[in-house]
Amino acid sequence: MQNDSTNTINDDLPMPDGSAPAPAPAPAPTAPSALAPVSANERIGVLDVIRGFALIGIFLMNIEFFNRAVGELGEGMPAGLTGLNWLASYVIAYFVAGKFWTIFSLLFGMGFALMLTRTEAKGQNFLKPYLRRLIALAIFGLLHHILIWPGDILFSYAIAAGGLLLILFAKIRWIFLAAIVLALFAAIPALNQVGAIAVALALLGGMTFLLRTEAVLKFFGKTMPITSAVLCVMGGIALLISLGGFFIPAMKAVRGLIFSAGFFFLLAYILARSHQPKEVRPWKIGSLLYCTLFISMIIGGSFEYWGTKETPTIASETGPQIENVVSSAPAASAASNAVMANASNPAAPSDAAKRKIAAAEQKKKQVEQEKKKEADNKLEVQILTKGTYLDAMKFRAKEFAENWPNVTIFSVLINCMFLIGFWFVRSGIMDNTKAHLPMFRRLALFGLPIGIGLGVAGSLITTAPVKGMDNDPFTLATGLLYLGNLPACLGYVSVLILMFNSAGVFAKVKLLAPYGRMALTNYLSQSIICSAVFYSYGLGYYGMQRSHQVVFVFIVVILQLMFSHWWLSKFRYGPMEWLWRAVTYWKLPAFKI
């Protein structure tokens, strides 16, 4: 395989750590050695252990949606659970779900950095084999989604890793230009979905700018990054507008902007502190953007919950859900009458009537969306409990065609975790975790109680959406849960690293390493096993109780763990890992030991 120097990738671009590109080395007298899979002694063992542990958590979360419509992902705990079923659902929802895809995302960023670092050290090409790696992963994910199960995460990781390539290597102006062009194409009705790619590119361009820009401004005598200066201006404008709301009765509605102003000033301060040194930007920017998203969700959820108490609400758990939503037709009719009255009486207030019309239209759209989603979920359950394999495959293909834009947007969030994982490797921490045990002790000590505590606090508010309630607190509760996923994820990883480096019984966690080395094979085989057991074209045990699902998971995990140990005693890689490496390096790696 022909290899170019890694520096061709970074020509005229900052290096991933933010430093200027190194001068191109003189041509070597001989071509560099071909890029090949790492040998067993080059692997970082603790990463395999973490990967194996994360796979167990992913299975505990995924199995629920082999027994429940995948369309209900993100809708909290199902209603009507009691006893052990409620306990199993609660523990997984608040101690597992969300914490383990973030661990996998962290690991993916680490893997990216490891491959990049090793190719740089050997003077080999990184971009070509990594692109093949991503294309293969995207194909695996697409086939997994359509042929087996629509809750696939592999396709999302492939798209997100493509975004990471842009963040680290692409020129910023080209990212934004591509976003603008695609946004223009999205104006064509037949290409509306392309708008999701435009949004994702714009967000990735913003992340790239934050990570790689060195531009600074003097603002009130202080030097700060240009992004911090812009946020200070935005905060100042929001503050002035909100202050007007306290003195001008007609502007009362904008008083809440004072919180936005505070948020802008806080972001400006954090970005200023994160700008230097360059080497720590990946984890600081990744953490900041992740937290910003869900803090915004918490703020919005708080206003939705506490800011609309005067709005009449309907919240019934036993009656019809969609039908009990406040009817939009009478509201629209009343608002229209008010507008007609205003036409004949210019002095009559019209803003209230306009707000009623807007609220009625918004409510109508929400009702329609809820009805469509409910119908899709019912259809999914019907197909998986009574339909054929061909019916299920057609449904999954249609679902993918409709929902791939959501994957594109979700990939931006994944990149926040990628950047944190990328920094862990580029900083050298993962090469020698034993030297950094005090840091991991602090992460475990604070990360787990804070992260899990935020989710549990949200569960005290609500564990599921309240249908028909205008000031539904579920957005607030979900924001707390998702915000806590980051510190909890780092806490879990830190506990595993501490156990891995211990000398006592906790060191037995190393038994998970073979399971993690075959993570792709085991992940896909979990889906094959579950579809064969639960779906109508298999054994038909769809709807297994939640507590029984947990037992099922641990039986399968034990069998997979034993199989992984046996397999890797005879072969170098798992079957899917071997195939993935063959595509990545474009040659057949040695298979048998």
Image: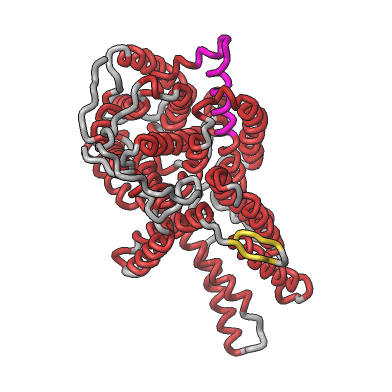
Looking at the image, what colour scheme do you see? secondary structure
Q: In the displayed structure, would residue 348 be above or below residue 237?
A: below
Q: Is residue 493 magenta?
A: yes
Q: Which residues are magenta?
A: 488-509
Residue at far right of view: 247
Query: Does 441 sit left or right of 581 as displayed?
Result: right
Q: Tell me the residue at 57%/43% (across/down).
A: 280
Q: Is residue 242 visible?
A: yes
Q: Tell me the residue at 61%/65% (across/down).
A: 230
**Which sits in the foreground, 467 or 581?**
581
Query: Does 160 sit left or right of 420 as displayed?
Result: left
Q: Tell me the residue at 55%/50% (across/down).
A: 289
Magenta region's main secondary structure?
A: helix
Residue 1, image x, y percentages: 21, 37
Q: Tell me the residue at 65%/42% (across/down).
A: 461
Q: Quadrant of residue 336?
A: bottom right
Quadrant into which the C terminus falls:
top left
Query: Does 336 sit left or right of 244 as displayed?
Result: left
Q: Is residue 543 magenta?
A: no
Give the total of numbered labels: 0
Q: In the displayed structure, would residue 353 be above or below residue 72?
A: below
Residue 326, image x, y percentages: 55, 59
